[in-house]
Image: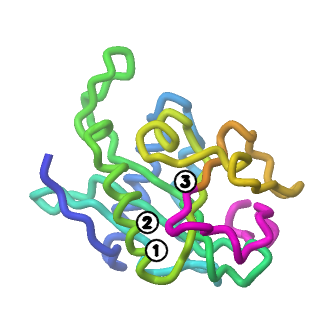
């Protein structure tokens, strides 16, 4: 499948709201579609939002088929070292079937490409590491993230995600060296 990754534009926002809503509402885990429909809008209002790191994948016809948002993650600093992948979605196709694992857009490498592109841009902007919460078969097995505990990172009481679902990846050697290695959502008001 051919697609191009580019920075989101304001005229994309409406379509992205629907893409995020459908992708999360129709996934195998039954995520909260209402929450995800407006999540990117809330992220854009945050002081940790980085416009260069909100990306879309567009198919040949221009149809938006993927969306990723990374933000600066304070870890004992002002968010200068680590990015957090807040949201990753790939369009849900009309004939997608979870039982037969038949998908029009998902499982075609679109999400992996968005994350890879975002991490390259993050490194070019001076960020040294990336973190995410999600499915181990996606982030650890497909994208090469490690469980955050294996890198000596802890979490505080503001993070209620289970340990098995939190991942980290260094974008350069010793990527967490200049942080306190404590994952906290204290400054992430848009998460609630």
Where is mark 2, residue-wise?
119
Residue 163 position, x and y percent, is 74, 41
> Does residue 191 appear to the left or right of 124 in the view shown?
right
What residue do we see at 46% from left, 36% from top? Answer: 141
Residue 175 position, x and y percent, is 60, 69
Q: Secondary structure at mark 3?
A: helix
The reply to whether callout 2 and callout 1 are in contact (CB within 8 Å) is yes
Q: Is residue 186 above or below residue 138?
A: below
Residue 151 position, x and y percent, is 69, 53
- 178 or 53, nearer to the observer: 178
Image quadrant holding the N terminus, namely top left
Q: Locate residue 106: give its quadrant.
A: top left
Q: Is residue 21 above or below residue 115?
A: above
- 21 or 137, nearer to the observer: 137
Neighbour class for label 1 at 10 Å: few (<14), some, many (≥20)?
many
Q: Which portion, as a residue range, is magenta?
A: 169-192
The number of numbered badges drawn on the structure is 3
Where is mark 1, residue-wise?
122
Q: Secondary structure at mark 2?
A: helix
Q: Is residue 57 visible?
A: yes
Q: Locate residue 169: give its quadrant.
A: bottom right
User: Which mark is on residue 36?
Assistant: 3
What residue do we see at 73% from left, 47% from top? Answer: 149
Residue 178 lies in magenta, yes or no?
Answer: yes
In terms of sequence position, does the residue under pointer 1 or pointer 3 come before the other? 3
Residue 21 position, x and y percent, is 46, 49
């Amino acid at each position: 499948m051919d697609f191009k990754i580019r920075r989101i534009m304001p005229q994309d926002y409406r379509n992205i709201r629907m893409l995020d809503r459908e992708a999360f509402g129709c996934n195998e885990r039954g995520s909260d579609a209402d929450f995800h429909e407006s999540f990117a809008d809330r992220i854009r209002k945050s002081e940790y939002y980085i416009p260069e790191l909100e990306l879309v994948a567009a198919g040949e016809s221009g149809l938006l088929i993927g969306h990723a948002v990374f933000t600066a993650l304070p870890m004992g600093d002002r968010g200068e070292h680590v990015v957090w992948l807040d949201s990753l979605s790939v369009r849900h196709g009309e004939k997608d079937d979870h039982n037969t694992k038949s998908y029009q857009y998902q499982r075609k490498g679109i999400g992996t490409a968005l994350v890879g592109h975002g991490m390259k841009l993050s490194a070019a902007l001076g960020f040294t590491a990336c973190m995410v919460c999600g499915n181990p078969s996606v982030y650890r097995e497909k994208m090469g993230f490690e469980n955050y505990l294996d890198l000596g990172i802890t979490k505080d009481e503001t993070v209620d995600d289970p340990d098995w679902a939190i991942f980290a990846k260094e974008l350069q050697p010793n990527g967490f060296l200049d942080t306190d290695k404590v994952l906290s959502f204290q400054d992430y008001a848009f998460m609630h």
